[in-house]
Image: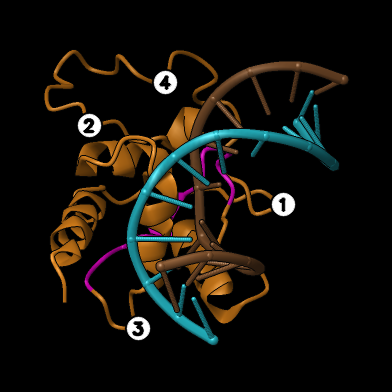
Chain colours: A orange, B brown, C cyan
Amino acid sequence: MSRAATAYDRIYAVVRRVPPGKVTTYGAVARLAGLPGRARQVGYALAALRDGTSVPWHRVVNAQGKLSLVRAGSPSGITQRLRLTREDVRVDAGDRVSLARYGWKLESRSSRGDARVPTANRASRA
DNA sequence: GCAATGACGCTCT
DNA sequence: CAGAGCGCCATTG
C-alpha cells in the first residue's frame, strides 16, 4: 500500500522523539515530518495507530494545546489525559495543557539552559 | 471517480 | 480567552 507508508513512518518517528513530560502539536509534527501545513494528515496517521503502538501519540495535542481526539470522553481521550498527567503534564479541566510550559521544540542544542519557556515558569505545581 | 468526513491550523470577531 | 469561519489534503463510502 502504498507509498504513503513513508509519510506515516515519518510522523511516527517525530512523535517518538518527543521526550516525556513534554507535548507537541500536530502542526509541529507535520512540519518536522516534512508535511508543512498538512497537520490534518498527522492526525489521520495517529488515528490509524492501534493499541500497543510504540508511538506516544498521547503527547501530541493540537495548536490550542487541547486534547483533540474524537472526543475527550472516549477511552483514548481518557487515556491520553491520564498518561500526560502521569508524566507531570498538567492537564486543564477543559483537556488543555500549557504549550508555553510543555511545548516541546526540536531544540537539538538546548545547552544554553532554557531558551524556551520565557516566563511563567515555576508558579504553581501540583 | 465524485462527494463527504476528519485525532488540524490560522485569522477574525 | 473563547467561539465561529475558511483552508489544507488524505482516507473512506
* Residue type beneath disc 1: Gly
Q: Chain of mark 2?
A: A
Quick check: do tags 3 and 1 share a chain? yes
Between C9 and A85, the residue placed more toward the observer is C9
- Circles 1 and 4 in contact, beta carbons < 8 Å: no
CB within 8 Å, label 3 to label 1: no
**What subunit carries mark 4?**
A
Query: In this rendering, would A18 be left or right of A64?
Result: left
Which secondary structure, mark 3? loop
Inspect the image, locate mark 3, and give the three-letter code of the amino acid beneath it: Asp
A51 above or below A16? below
Query: Which residue is depicted at the point 17% across and 53% down?
Result: A10
Residue A14 badge: none
Mark sitting earlier along the chain (2/3)? 3
Quadrant, the N terminus of chain A: bottom left
The residue under the point 49% across, 27% down is A100
State the SS at label 4.
loop
Mark 3 belongs to which subunit?
A: A
Contact? badges 1 and 2 (CB < 8 Å): no
Mark seen at residue A51: 3
Q: How many marks?
A: 4
Q: Which residue is mark 1?
A: A94
Do the residues under discs 2 and 3 have CB atoms within 8 angstroms?
A: no
Disc 4 target residue: A117
Say which label, 4 or 2, has the lower sequence index: 2
**Front-most of A120 and A74?**
A74
For the record, the magenta segment spans A54-66
Looking at marks 1 and 4 on the same chain, the residue that comes earlier in the sequence is marked by: 1
Q: For mark 1, give the secondary structure.
A: loop
Relative depth, front residue between A35 and A118 = A35
